[in-house]
Amino acid sequence: MQRAQATQAAAQQRATTAATQQRELIRRNADLAIAAAQRAAADAEMHRESRRLYVEARTADAAAANADLRARLSDLDSLLHSTLDVDDHIDLDRFKKPAEVPPFDPGPLGRPIPEPSWESYEPPTPRGVGKILGGDRFHQQQTTSARQAYQEARRRWIDAETRRRRQLAAREQAYEESKQKYEAKIASYNAEVDRFAAAVASADPASVVEYFAMVLGNSVYPDDFPQHFRLAYLPKQKHLLIEYHLPPVEVIPVVKEYRYDRVRDDLVATPRDEGEIRRRYTEVISQVSLRTVHEIVEADRGELVANISFNGIVDTIDRRTGIFVRPCLVSLRTRREVFAPIKLRRVDPVACLKHLQAGLSGLPDELEGVTPLVDFDREADQDLTGEFNVLAEIDERPNLLAMSDDEFEQVVADLLGNMGLEMGRCTRSGGRSRWLASDPRPVFGGKVIVYATRGGPVGHSTAHTLADAVAAAGATKGILIATAGYESEAYDSAAGRPLELLDGPGLLNLLAEHSRIKARLEPPD
């Protein structure tokens, strides 16, 4: 019975111990589960907060891009009004320089060298006990030595002072000679200004052309507008002929709006309607035409010009053939007394041109030209014609279209590197440059395929090729850069795919923002 009781007690003790251990294990597991759940909740909250901040940043990027679009459209809409508050007349007298010469400055040479004084060398006279103990003899020796030192110092002073006066005289002579040369140079320059002003006033054709070239050269346009023109003046008819290079249709943003797509984690561009692009481009070339004629009329206070002929041409690439063309999109012939009374601040530019019976292309975006009302080359005397390219003369911005392939590829690689991509080696194929890049972001990053081309407008085939390359490489995104823009089919091909299309104006904006490079796109001669 005792053994049975002992056995039973031992069994109960083991059962109690096992139950206790089981409860402790369950408690520990529960604590671990709670801690894990708390950590998971904290991680989830941190992830949600990080995701929220990221979405806000990308949404802000879209808002900034839309703000840039609105600013660009505002600049285009105000091309005509922006010049109406500016006095375009050039006062040639303001080019004269005053003959102001700074006074002669002798510098250190103008200060005489202090003359040595005997008092500073003379030894003191012995007195008292020193005089009694033979001081007179010692004083005489000191005086002899001091006089020798004084005389030596005075000799050096005379030499130095003579040298100073000689150098001062030479410096004064050089100043007078320089002053006379400068005054003669200024007088000659001011006389040239007077001769030019007199030649303009007397209707000298070459001088009149030069003056109005200065007027048009002072006109401030957006950076991607060409300021290239030819002028000719026929003095007998008081007729000024203008052949002006209009901006291409690419100055109109092809993107209407940007929005952030959370699913694709990308800025999605909504393309602008072709009808709106045509309307806006027609307004732009109309404003440039009226603005040019207005600046000529306002600057002509001497009434040198009674008749104005304006041909607005555009140097661009025909998207249908890929070749450079130069159609005339606007042609206007008017008289001063007809144009001057027009209140340009209140007119519709297109309607104003029609009122002036100008030729205006109905499809300028498709490079449909008009017949010029005046043949510049036939009417103008070539000896009296001046051609001026304001930007070519003063613009040091790099021209992306004139770069070598290596230079252009380096510019693009540096830009995308500044924007956060890790660029791989560049290869060339089919007239375009290709990179396999990497987006280092931990969640939304991955491989990126980049194509860049400087040929004609890109069609759907290139977009298809890029999409296939993205899929084959397992990339998260493709970027297509085309300086000449895109055909509408390219946007259709890119719709719904992880492709981003970047045109010429967009590339210029990104270079200015991320690479601090003010570039331009001008077809090489």
Image (cartoon, rainbow, N blue to C red):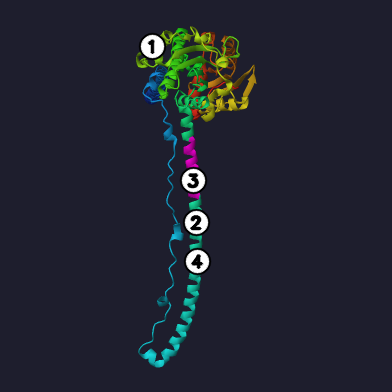
At a point 40% along the width and 11% down the height, the residue shown is 352
Q: Which is nearer the N-term, disc 4 or disc 2?
A: 4
Indicate which disc, 2 or 1, sits on the residue closer to the N terminus.
2
Helix, strand or loop under label 1: loop
> Which SS does the magenta portion mostly show?
helix
CB under 8 Å between discs 4 and 2: no
Q: Secondary structure at mark 4?
A: helix
Mark 3–mark 2 Cα distance, whole angstroms, equals 16 Å
Q: Are marks 3 and 2 in contact (CB under 8 Å)?
A: no
What is the crowding at mark 3: few (fewer than 14 residues within 10 Å), some, or many (at least 20)? Answer: some
Can you say which quadrant of the picture contains the C terminus? top right
Mark closest to the chain's N terminus, 4 or 3 = 4
Sequence-first disc among 3 and 2: 2
Q: Amino acid at mark 3?
A: Tyr
Q: Compare residues 440 and 384 and report the one nearer the observer.
A: 384
Tell whether position 189 is magenta: yes
- Look at mark 1 in the image and give the residue it sits on: 348
Left/right of residue 108 with respect to residue 431 in the rendered view: left
Range of residues picked out in magenta: 178-192
Judging by the rendered image, the residue that carries numbered circle 2 is 171
Name which residue type carries label 2: Arg
Rounded to the nearest angstrom, the CA distance separating label 1 from label 3 is: 53 Å
Q: Which residue is mark 4?
A: 162
Q: Secondary structure at mark 2?
A: helix
